[in-house]
Amino acid sequence: MWDFFETVRHRHSVRQYQPDMPVEAEKLHAILEMASAAPSAGDLQAYRIVVTQDAATRAALGRAAQKQVFLSDAPVCLVFCAEPNRSAQAFGERGAALYALQDATIAAAYAQLAIVAAGLGSIWIGYFDEPKVRDILDLDPELQPIALLCLGYPAELPESSPRRRLDEIVIYR
């Protein structure tokens, strides 16, 4: 088993998936459990995760995601949605505007690392038409789609992308 640092280093954006290799239910369950283990403001978990394995739904999501067609090639798509009203009950406007968004994002990041640890690949999609995604998934009005996370067995091993040096992003005071 990889340690955490190796898991992070092996996370890449995968756009090609092995056909006819579904994600095992046990692995998907473990990934969802890790997402739900993510920290959240007030431990409210102000988010929902929509799981879609239906090919037609994934294809529609791909079209809503500015024609990122590889979305339909991945056997699973997790749609992370913020639940602002849940957070607002405890934290008011800041909870609705920020904390629920953070909660959904942290849960998606945990899921993405769990996907790598499970021997799968994924890609995070944030560029999509929100009203179309809401319509495709028939989302409750109180849910706000934040990220689409496609996953499956990779059919490619992408190169690591360049990263900014720490001295360009870290400020010590």
Image: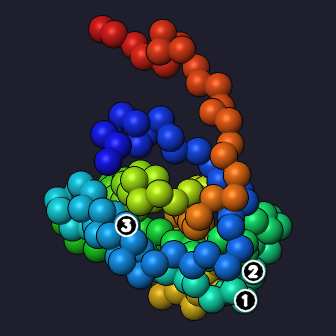
| Nearest to viewer (mark 3 / mark 2) | 3
What separation in Å lies between label 2 and label 1 (alpha carbons)?
5 Å
Residue depicted at 75% across the width and 80% down the height: 59
Residue depicted at 50% across the width and 41% down the height: 10
Q: Is residue 20 above or below residue 91?
A: below
Disc 1 on helix, strand or loop? helix
Q: Quadrant of the C terminus?
A: top left
Q: Of 108 and 141, which appears nearest the observer?
A: 108
> Percent position (x, y) of residue 1?
32, 48
| Nearest to viewer (mark 3 / mark 1) | 3
**Relative to 2, is 151 on the left or the right?**
right
- What's under tag 1, amino acid-wise? Ala
**Relative to 156, is 69 on the left or the right?**
right
Q: Which residue is mark 2?
A: 59
> Percent position (x, y) of residue 73?
72, 72
- Mark identifier at residue 56: 1
- What's under tag 3, amino acid-wise? Ile
Q: Picture quarter containing residue 133?
A: bottom right
- Mark identifier at residue 22: none
Disc 3 on helix, strand or loop? helix
| Badge 3 or badge 1: first in the primary sequence | 3
What separation in Å lies between label 3 and label 1 (alpha carbons)?
23 Å
What separation in Å lies between label 3 and label 2 (alpha carbons)?
22 Å
Residue depicted at 42% across the width and 68% down the height: 82
Contact between labelled residues 1 and 2, with CB atoms less than 8 Å apart: yes
- What's under tag 2, amino acid-wise? Ala
Residue 22 visible within the image: yes
> Percent position (x, y) of residue 67?
82, 67
Residue 109 visible within the image: no
Q: Residues within 10 Å of mark 2 (few under 14, many from 20)?
A: some
Q: Which residue is mark 3?
A: 31
> Percent position (x, y) of residue 164?
58, 20
